[in-house]
């Protein structure tokens, strides 16, 4: 009997002891448990992690030891272990204010504190991406301070950074350069081929200052980081599902992912599909132009349906020929090879339905719709990559990442005019092979001096083909083809290639406790080969060319923190962009002008100076920042009239058109600034906003530069408590007058602005503003609902240089299961 009592007492004591060694970590606001917190001791090499219930065993730490609880999304907490009983072994964490020392991944391709970086960097993390709920990645980019997005059709989006866009902006996904040899000037709609549903974060570096990325990054770098699986001591399966419906274009988006975690490896599989109907524009026309942008008639022709005449639109506010579908697949495998080595295999595939080219299908010639068919064939992007991360801790290689990748891009253009049976096809296939290595080492025993260095090699193979088919028609049915005819290819039909290779080194040092110096240099060498065979329409002085270009670029940046709540920064940098296949060899028609090859095109250069001021308030819970810059463009590339073989016109697609080409000019400048603020100003209340100004002119011609947006910005006020969050957002855009447009290049699409019959001129872009509403309710730790109203007052407007009218009032409903 005595033995049984003692045994029970022992088990009770032992159970109490075990319970006393367990802590639970929860969110202060929602009281939901926090998974994957790292808990470590002051002088103890061991670490423990919280499970999905927020629990962790802390028996490995001594009672008199200070333990630290750390999670990327929360403010770090330190507590004496024996004091845990005072809170019943429950630890409450407060979410990080957005303005605390953020971690930047893209600046040096490794984790770096934002306070040590002089460049202007904007970050959107997963929580913010989910809050924005963008239909496409282009819509996500439009929400970032300092970025304006142009759209020729709904299935696209061309981001503008500091007055530069298209192939002057570098797109990167998971460390792999997306820019390829046919990334074009003007407007580039490829940003949507990365679905926002697979993104973990997006980072934007403004300006040409990063030697890590080099050529193409004149206006800046947009780096997409997709979700990555994580290993775990216990076998785990995590399921995530997202479903959304939007009224403005009857959008349905469904996304699901499964993450499987083991101790040594993990897998993430994600699939998403979006279906977009025709987009409805806003009804209220405060700009005073009653019919601007309305679609009164449209073509209902398809690849198998024929209609000789346009169809009357019963609702001119519905923009016919704007809908499309898109599917995205992501598969990642992560293997922990050792404590110092891991490898990630990354498979991404994006494909779409046919995407109507709205601006072309709305184009008139002699008072009639010009095209009965004009659409992009399915846009396909395949990425296969492997990324090896090593941590040898050697003298000259402390950490490193080696990334090998293959990309296959397919795009096509199909068009046919009204009153014609001739349909033309232009197909482009690009294969890109790349290898880059990025390494870093800490110099000295303290961590205030870092050296990073690396290399990058990318080879592009471009195959461009074209052909024409005369369709055979039976009533309204296209039953086949009769004859073939010759069509001019978009790029060199004999094949072309573009190879870029580069090496760089970057040095960062904390000169004092309050200041950091960063310097870097990069050498880039490019080789372009192109061959034209068919001379039916155009004969060139040389049909087989090889162009080689090389350049050094450099940067120096300095941050100074005279006070804990103040940071000053300055950057001097240079950039270089070697012409690609699209710059030199593209042939295409727009508004009666045909772009023709210029085989003597040379690289363009930029020289940039910028300053930044960042002021913190209330223990870094709120900040105000100002970034201003001056960029000098030298030998810059712009379009102008370009006679070929002594002729200023050619016959193209059965029409006489003026020939233009990309040519080098002398000097131009772009100046601008972005003022932004964000943070908590009161308990449960947050605000953020930005305003961006840009101006650009050519020194040699005195003309305005293309792609310079008018003043734009946004303001947001949000409130959150416990499981509920809501916000109001105000977006605004100033007008851009006719005299501020570059009418020679035609990039800014002045013909898409209102027309004044009394003056016989286009007016330019009218100003606009919208008010938007957002709300979210967290039903549990795994289920949340989101409701949004965009453009509450149903305003009609167009984004600068866009052909398509912006969405009208939109109700959006989402459910997220995690």
Image (spheres, rainbow, N blue to C red):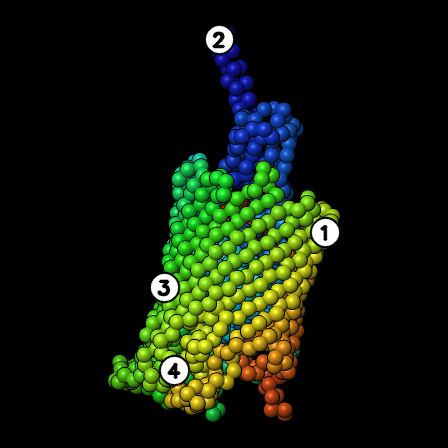
Label whose residue precedes the other's in the sequence (4 or 3): 3
Specify whether residue 590 is in view. Answer: no
**What's the residue at 73%, 49% (across, down)?**
562
Question: In screen coordinates, is 100 left or right of 281?
Answer: right
**Helix, strand or loop status at disc 3:** strand
Residue 463 at x, y percent in the picture: 34, 70
Which residue corresponds to mark 2? 3
Specify which label sits upstream in the sequence, 1 or 2.
Answer: 2
The residue under the point 70% across, 49% down is: 561
Residue 566 shows which numbered tag? Answer: 1
Splitting the image into 4 quarters, where does residue 71 fall? top right
Mark 4 and mark 1 lie on one chain; the one further toward the N terminus is 4
Q: CA distance from mark 4 to mark 3?
A: 26 Å
Q: Earlier in the sequence, mark 2 or mark 3?
A: 2
Looking at the picture, how far across and down is residue 101, in whole percent? Answer: 63, 47
Frontmost of labels 4 and 3 is 4
Q: If you read the primary sequence from the N terminus, does the residue marked by circle 4 or circle 2 appear first?
A: 2
Q: Residues within 10 Å of mark 2 (few under 14, many from 20)?
A: few
Give the residue number, with chain letter if any, for mark 3.
Answer: 431
Q: Is residue 678 above or below residue 364?
A: above
In 3D space, how far apart are the residues under numbered discs 3 and 1 (Cα atoms)?
47 Å
Residue visible at 44% across and 37% down in the picture:
339
Q: Could you tell me if residue 474 is visible in this image?
A: yes
Q: Cα distance, mark 1 to mark 2?
A: 68 Å
Q: Which residue corresponds to the image point at 40% horizontal and 40% vertical from the top-left?
A: 337
> Which quadrant holds residue 807?
bottom right
Q: From the viewer's perspective, is residue 669 above or below residue 524?
A: below
Which disc, if any, is residue 540?
4
């Amino acid at each position: 009997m005595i033995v049984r009592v003692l045994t029970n007492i022992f088990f009770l004591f032992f159970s109490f002891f075990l319970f006393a060694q367990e802590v639970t970590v929860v969110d202060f606001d929602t009281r939901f448990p926090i998974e994957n917190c790292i808990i470590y001791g002051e002088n103890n090499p061991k670490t423990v992690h919280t499970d999905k219930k927020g629990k962790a065993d802390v028996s490995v730490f001594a009672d008199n030891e200070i333990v630290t609880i750390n999670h990327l999304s929360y403010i770090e907490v330190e507590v004496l272990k024996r004091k845990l009983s005072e809170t019943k072994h429950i630890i409450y964490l407060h979410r990080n204010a957005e303005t605390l020392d953020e971690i930047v991944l893209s600046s040096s391709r490794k984790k770096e504190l934002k306070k040590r970086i002089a460049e202007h960097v904007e970050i959107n993390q997963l929580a913010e991406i989910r809050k924005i709920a963008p239909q496409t990645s282009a819509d996500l980019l439009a929400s970032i301070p300092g970025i304006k997005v142009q759209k020729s059709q709904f299935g696209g989006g061309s981001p503008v950074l500091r007055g530069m866009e298209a192939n002057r902006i570098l797109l990167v996904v998971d460390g792999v350069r997306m820019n390829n040899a046919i990334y074009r000037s003007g407007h580039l709609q490829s940003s949507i081929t990365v679905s926002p549903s697979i993104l973990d974060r997006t980072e934007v570096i403004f300006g040409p200052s990063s030697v890590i990325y080099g050529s193409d990054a004149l206006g800046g770098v947009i780096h997409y980081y997709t979700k990555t699986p994580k290993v775990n001591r216990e076998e785990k399966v995590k399921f995530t599902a997202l479903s959304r419906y939007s009224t403005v274009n009857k959008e349905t988006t469904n996304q699901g992912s499964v993450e499987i975690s083991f101790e040594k490896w993990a897998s993430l599989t994600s699939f998403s599909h979006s279906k977009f109907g025709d987009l409805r524009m806003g009804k209220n026309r405060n700009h005073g132009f009653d019919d601007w942008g309305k679609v009164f008639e449209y073509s209902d022709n398809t690849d198998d349906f024929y209609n000789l005449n346009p169809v009357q639109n019963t609702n001119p506010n519905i923009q016919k020929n704007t809908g499309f579908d898109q599917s995205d697949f992501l598969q990642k495998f992560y293997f922990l090879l050792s404590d110092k080595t891991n490898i990630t295999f990354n498979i991404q595939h994006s494909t779409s339905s046919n995407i109507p080219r709205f601006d072309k299908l709305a184009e008139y010639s002699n008072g009639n719709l010009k095209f009965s068919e004009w659409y992009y064939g399915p846009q396909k992007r395949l990425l296969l990559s492997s990324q090896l991360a090593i941590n040898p801790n050697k003298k000259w290689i402390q950490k490193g990442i080696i990334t090998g990748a293959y990309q296959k891009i397919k795009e096509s253009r199909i068009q046919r005019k009204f009153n014609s049976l001739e349909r033309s096809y232009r197909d482009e296939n690009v294969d890109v092979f790349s290898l880059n290595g990025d390494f870093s080492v800490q110099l000295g025993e303290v961590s205030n001096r870092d050296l990073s260095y690396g290399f990058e090699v990318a080879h592009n193979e471009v195959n461009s083909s074209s052909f024409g088919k005369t369709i055979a028609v039976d009533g309204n049915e296209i039953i086949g083809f009769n004859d073939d005819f010759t069509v001019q290819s978009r790029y060199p039909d004999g094949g072309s290639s573009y190879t870029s290779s580069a090496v760089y080194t970057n040095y960062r040092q904390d000169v004092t406790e309050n200041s950091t110096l960063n310097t870097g240099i990069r050498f880039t060498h490019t080789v372009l080969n192109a061959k034209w065979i068919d001379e039916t329409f155009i004969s060139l002085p040389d049909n087989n060319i090889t162009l080689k270009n090389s350049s050094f670029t450099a940067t120096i940046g300095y941050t100074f923190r005279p006070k804990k709540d103040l940071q000053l920064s300055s950057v001097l940098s240079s950039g270089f962009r070697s012409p690609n296949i699209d710059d030199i060899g593209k042939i295409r028609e727009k508004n009666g002008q045909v772009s023709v090859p210029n085989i003597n095109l040379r690289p363009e250069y930029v020289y940039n100076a910028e300053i930044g001021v960042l002021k913190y308030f209330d223990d870094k819970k709120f900040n105000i920042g100002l970034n201003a810059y001056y960029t000098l463009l030298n030998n810059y590339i712009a379009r102008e009239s370009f006679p070929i073989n002594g002729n200023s016109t050619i016959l193209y697609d059965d029409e006489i058109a003026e020939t233009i080409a990309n040519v080098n000019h002398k000097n131009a400048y772009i100046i601008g600034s972005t003022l932004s603020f964000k943070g908590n100003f009161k308990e449960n209340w947050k605000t953020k906003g930005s305003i961006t100004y840009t101006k650009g002119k050519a020194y040699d011609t005195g003309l305005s530069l293309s792609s310079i947006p008018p003043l734009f910005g946004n303001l947001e006020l949000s409130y959150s408590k416990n499981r509920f969050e809501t916000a109001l957002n105000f977006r605004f855009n100033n007008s851009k007058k006719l005299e501020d447009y570059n009418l020679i290049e035609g990039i800014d699409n002045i013909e898409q602005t209102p027309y004044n019959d009394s003056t016989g001129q286009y007016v330019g872009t009218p100003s606009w503003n919208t008010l938007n509403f957002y709300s979210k309710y967290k039903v549990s730790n795994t289920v949340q609902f989101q409701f949004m109203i965009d453009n509450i007052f149903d305003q009609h407007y167009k984004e600068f240089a866009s052909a398509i009218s912006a969405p009208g009032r939109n109700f959006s409903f989402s459910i997220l299961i995690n």
